[in-house]
Image (cartoon, rainbow, N blue to C red):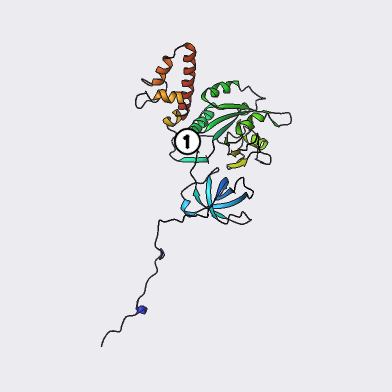
Amino acid sequence: MGRRPIDESDFHSRPSKRGSRPRTKTRPEHEDAVSGLVTGVDRGRYTLLVDEDQPDEHVVTAMKARELTRQRVVCGDRVDVVGDTTGEEGSLARIVRITERATVLRRTADDTDPYERIIVANADQLVIVTALADPEPRTRMIDRCVVAAYDAGMDVLLCLTKADLASPDALRSLYEPIGVSVVTTSRGDEGEITPLEAVRDSLSGRTSVFVGHSGVGKSTLVNALVPGARRTTGVVNDVTGRGRQTSTSAVALRLPEHDGARGWVIDTPGVRSFGLAHVQIEHLLTAFDDLDEVAQECPRGCTHLEGSPDCALDEWVAASPDDEVRAARAARLDSFRRLLVSRA
């Protein structure tokens, strides 16, 4: 007796748990994507400004696409989004690309932590807000912020608040020689911040990120600069001399027009530490053009710290043509070495 012919009913296939679609590395081009500026981040949801400075400018809420799972989107990022970009209530777009960042401000948890935390992207100026009293200024913390900014290729503005309580002269003499611009503000009789004109001049047309300890008046200053910002302010603890953290996440706020230009302020939560494990000495040197050129003659492995054998920077100071130049070079080198020590 011959066998029955086999047909399709005799074939049984067990479905694959991974699905039947072949995997591919080809990703969609998303040619219909629109660009947006990340102005806020909150628990996996991103607030974007789409069509910035255009008549149809509007706010969109978005989430990251799956292919960006391992990439962090931060305040200040320029991104491409697809999906529902109308900005209507309940709508949700999808971030599919992060455009190339012009600058990235980073920090680590401490100086031994190998993991970098990106604070903000695409800012061109770091504004270090420091109170002259109540709480007392911490120069080591300022130094570390300056190092992080120079490493990121950003300019630095030191904003000294509460000048009605103490003189700013000592801090000016420390930071102006290393290229840090300094402005001061005071509290008026009614608690208002004055004067603000110099601060506005320094922020106009730029994207500036504000950092500072809790209690130094950072949020108060932001509220004075950006009407309607409503950043929560706090007070200084009478026992510890420290402020209570009030801002919980970074947010980008657009400044009112000033002298025909507008700018952005990115307010960040108060910080108590600023790790610099990611900073290389070579990167820091580039912020000091004169020292960077001289350091090219240093022996390999030179730390450039005081007492480093055959350091060309010491020879540069010793070879000064007169006492005035020698004093200026020595002050410049001392400032640079102070920043190096803050990194150590």
Residue 254, image x, y percentages: 62, 41
Which residue is situated farthest in the bottom direction here? 1
Q: Is residue 224 left or right of residue 142?
A: right
**Is 137 or 81 nearer to us in this picture?**
81
Q: Is residue 329 left or right of residue 254?
A: left
Q: Is residue 71 left or right of residue 84?
A: left
Residue 105, image x, y percentages: 51, 37
Q: Is residue 289 above or below residue 248?
A: above
Give the residue drawn at x 57%, y 27%.
181
User: Image quarter for residue 12?
Assistant: bottom left
Callout 1: 10 Å neighbours few (<14), some, many (20+)?
Answer: some
Q: Is residue 29 above or below residue 37?
A: below
Task: Write down the residue under mark 1.
Answer: 110
Residue type at mark 1?
Asp
Q: Is residue 304 visible?
A: no
User: Image quarter for residue 200?
Assistant: top right
Residue 31, image x, y percentages: 50, 54
Q: Is residue 31 above or below residue 132?
A: below
Q: Is residue 316 above or below residue 25?
A: above
Q: Is residue 284 visible?
A: yes
Question: Which quadrant of the rendered structure holds the N terminus?
Answer: bottom left
Question: Which quadrant of the rendered structure holds the C terminus?
Answer: top left
Which residue is situated farthest in the top direction here? 322
